[in-house]
Amino acid sequence: MDNDSADKSTEYLRSLDWISLIERKPEAGESGFMAHGRALDMVLDRAATDYLFLPHTDTFIHDPAIFELMLNECRAADNVIAVGCVDQIYRGQIRIVWRPLPAI
């Protein structure tokens, strides 16, 4: 699912024949979290699998073991419905500091 990325990631994903890319243009005036939620709803409506891995289109996977790790977390208990990952590469102090600040 691409939710109107502004970089070249969507162009690259269109070139891959082994994925099913869904592209969505946000509605005028739609807030970021609503656009994200509606995009995920589109994916869930089309998914026909027991497990679904939803990285952003501009996410780089540096360790292929992450797929098995996430799948193991999903299988760990019957009441697990979602898992996530917050480990990111260090991009500088400014990128870390702004995250807890409220939106203006």
Image (tube, rainbow, N blue to C red):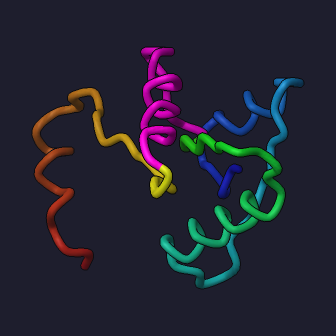
Q: Is residue 25 magenta?
A: no
Q: Nearer the viewer, residue 54 or 82?
A: 82
Q: Quadrant of residue 85?
A: top left
Residue 58 position within the rendered picture, expressed as x and y whole percent measured from the top left: 54, 37
From this viewpoint, which residue is outermost toward the bottom?
A: 29
Residue 25 position within the rendered picture, expressed as x and y whole percent measured from the top left: 74, 65
Q: Nearer the viewer, residue 32 or 63?
A: 63
The image shows residue 95, relative to residue 68, as above or below, that is: below
Residue at position x 43%, y 26% in the image: 69
Residue 39 shown left or right of residue 66 in the figure: right
Q: Quadrant of residue 91?
A: top left
The image shows residue 38, relative to residue 89, as above or below, that is: below
From this viewpoint, which residue is outermost toward the front?
A: 78
Image quadrant containing the C terminus: bottom left
Residue 44 position within the rendered picture, expressed as x and y whole percent measured from the top left: 72, 60
The image shows residue 88, relative to residue 84, as above or below, that is: above
Q: Nearer the viewer, residue 30 or 21?
A: 21
Residue at position x 15%, y 67% in the image: 101
Q: Is residue 65 magenta?
A: yes
Q: How many marks?
A: 0
> Range of the magenta residues?
57-77
Residue 26 shown left or right of residue 82 in the figure: right
Residue at position x 20%, y 44% in the image: 95
The image shows residue 11, relative to residue 6, as above or below, that is: above
Residue 103 shown left or right of residue 7 in the figure: left
